[in-house]
Image (spheres, grey):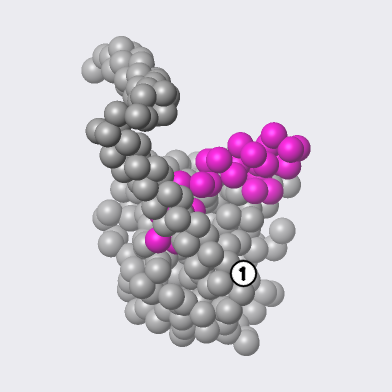
Amino acid sequence: MKTRKRLFIALLVLSLGMIGGLVFSGWYLLVHRDIWINQVLLIALTAFIIGFLGLVSFGIFSLVLTLWSSKTMPTLQNIMILATNMLFPLALSLGQAVGIDKEKIRASFVAVNNQLVHNRGLKVNPGDILILAPHCLQWSECPHKITINVNNCRRCGQCPISDLHQLAETYGIKFAVATGGTLARSFVKKHHPKAIVAVACERDLTSGIQDVNPLPVMGILNTRPNGPCYNTDVDIVEVEMSIREILSGKRPMSLVIRNKDFAHTP
């Protein structure tokens, strides 16, 4: 099916027109504020802007308070999500403007998200947890396709996929490998998890966490010893720690599977 480019162009023009219209309206109301109807509209517009900024500010304050106190605030969850999603693109652009690497900003976002999930003290049944991993963890020379059926993995130990299989079987949780965001979202719809342990790079984790909100996601950054998207790796112990925390509602003090028992050792 041919994609219409004019749809996106039309939306861009419409967006520009809306911004221009708002600017013009504000200017007009200020210039002609002696007219009573304009005074009413100006007050209403000002009240709306102040209310919106106040809501976002309250969301950020609640976020900081939650992180500082290490306690969850369920009633403020949606406000914190709204504030984060609204300001994250601006924060990313601002950070880049002052020379901060965007991957560091995204990694910080993932760390904040993980702390919020930790504060919630989740206790989820094993069957309701999904390990979601990227295809780049698979050994590049492997001939077996695992994105359609993860059980095609032969457990050879050449990559972390075999260890993730072992974790899934040990704890009785679901496991899927995705080639990208679209397939990842389809797995979430298919399995209907109540919590996700996701492995990915900073960009994919950030977008994925935002896509599935308010579904809790523990994000674990992969390591890239061979460069991006090629024979990547992950700390399996960190994955197991996240699984056990979601199962028990608290950070575990010990592991069921010892590091030396894993087939893949980077």
The stretch drawn in magenta includes residue 203: no
Residue at horizontal 74%, vertical 38%?
Answer: 98
The x and y percentages for residue 25 are 35, 25
Residue 110: image quadrant is: bottom right
Q: Is residue 211 visible?
A: no
Which quadrant is home to the N terminus? top left
Residue 46: image quadrant is: top left
Tag 1 secondary structure = helix
When the figure is inspected, residue 127 is found, relative to residue 23, above or below; the finding is: below
The x and y percentages for residue 201 are 59, 48
- Magenta stretch, residue numbers: 79-105
Q: Is residue 141 left or right of residue 132?
A: right
Q: Is residue 176 left or right of residue 60?
A: left
Camera-side residue: 182 or 235?
A: 182
Residue at horizontal 40%, vertical 81%?
Answer: 123
Tag 1: Cα neighbours inside 10 Å, few (<14), some, or many (≥20)? few
When the figure is inspected, residue 263 is found, relative to residue 136, above or below; the finding is: below
Q: What residue is disc 1 on?
A: 238
Camera-side residue: 8 or 212?
A: 8
Q: Is residue 94 visible?
A: yes
